[in-house]
Image (spheres, helix red, strand yellow):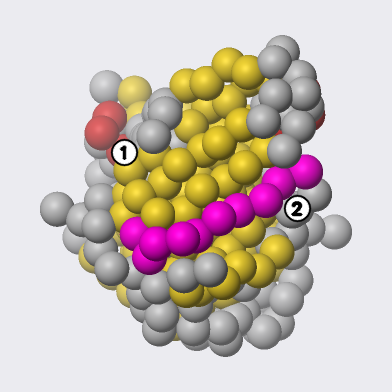
């Protein structure tokens, strides 16, 4: 079993839809939860970062962490064609130098005008 | 604007060749990483360095080595390239204590 599971999609939605992206994980030591966005032919960029459980909102994006269920989500409201990208969840435990970070496989999202 | 720069976007190499992938960061970060990205598998850590001349194996180090002679530069070496090393290679850097990693644009390596 992989430490981090993420449905690779692809996911296609119309412009303006609410998008839900999810990851599950098995390592209860994970405390830091990240979402990276990767445009085609580019490297990933950090989109959202959450520590422990709870919600975090940034504009149209909301990250949720449920540690009891080992489940994290990223919601995108009023999705735009510019949101079309691959979204990677990532998580790490305690190491301050990030060498324990584990990534999901990435979900490919297309938002159609 | 902070930057992680990988020397090549695309590379085609022959089986058995020694391959060098170079990465430079301009942010004075202590930590540098090499990942490979494959469909359905996500990013997997090959090697990690937390200081000049210091390195640690990641999850899939077999067939690879690294070099970090200067703080800003981290090189990945494929000692004898094989077809199963055809992949997207991503370099990243981060500050100790910060959770944000900065990635380069990736090198798509094809071994024929």
Residue at position x 61%, y 68% in the image: B55
In terms of depth relative to the viewer, which is nearer, B19 or A57?
B19
Do the residues at pointers 2 and 1 share their chain? no
Q: Residue furthest front?
A: B69
Q: Is residue B66 magenta?
A: yes
Left or right relative to A54: residue B89: right
Q: CA distance from mark 2 to mark 1?
A: 32 Å
Q: Is residue A105 visible?
A: no
In terms of depth relative to the viewer, which is nearer, A15 or B73?
B73
Q: Position of residue B37 (x, y in %)?
A: 60, 40
Q: Is residue B34 visible?
A: yes
- Mark 2 crowdedness (10 Å alpha carbons): few <14, some 14-19, many ≥20: few
Left or right relative to B52: residue B48: right
Q: Is residue A45 magenta?
A: no
Left or right relative to A112: residue A92: right
Residue marked by disc 2? B60
Q: Under tag 1, what secondary structure?
A: helix
Position above or below: A108 against B56: above
Residue range of the region highlighted in magenta in the rendering: B63-72
Magenta segment's dominant SS is strand
Residue at position x 70%, y 82% in the image: A28
């Amino acid at each position: 079993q992989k430490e981090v599971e993420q449905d690779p999609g692809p996911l296609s939605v119309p412009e303006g839809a609410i998008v839900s992206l999810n990851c599950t994980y098995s390592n209860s030591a994970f405390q830091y939860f990240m979402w990276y966005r990767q445009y085609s032919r580019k490297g990933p960029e950090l989109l959202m970062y959450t520590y422990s459980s709870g919600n975090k909102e940034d504009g149209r994006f909301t990250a949720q962490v449920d540690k009891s269920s080992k489940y994290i989500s990223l919601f995108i409201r009023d999705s735009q064609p510019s949101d079309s990208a691959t979204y990677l969840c990532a998580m790490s435990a305690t190491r301050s130098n990030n060498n324990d970070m584990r990534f999901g496989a990435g979900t490919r999202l297309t938002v159609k005008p | 604007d902070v930057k992680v720069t990988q020397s090549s976007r695309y590379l085609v190499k022959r089986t058995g060749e020694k391959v060098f992938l170079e990465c430079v960061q301009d942010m004075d970060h202590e930590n540098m990483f090499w990942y490979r990205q494959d469909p359905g598998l996500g990013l997997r850590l090959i090697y990690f360095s937390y200081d000049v001349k210091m390195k640690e194996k990641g999850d899939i180090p077999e067939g690879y080595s690294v070099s970090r002679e200067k703080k800003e530069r981290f090189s990945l070496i494929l000692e004898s390239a094989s077809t199963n090393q055809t992949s997207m290679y991503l370099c990243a850097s981060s500050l100790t204590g910060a959770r944000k990693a900065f990635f380069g644009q990736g090198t798509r390596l094809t071994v024929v």
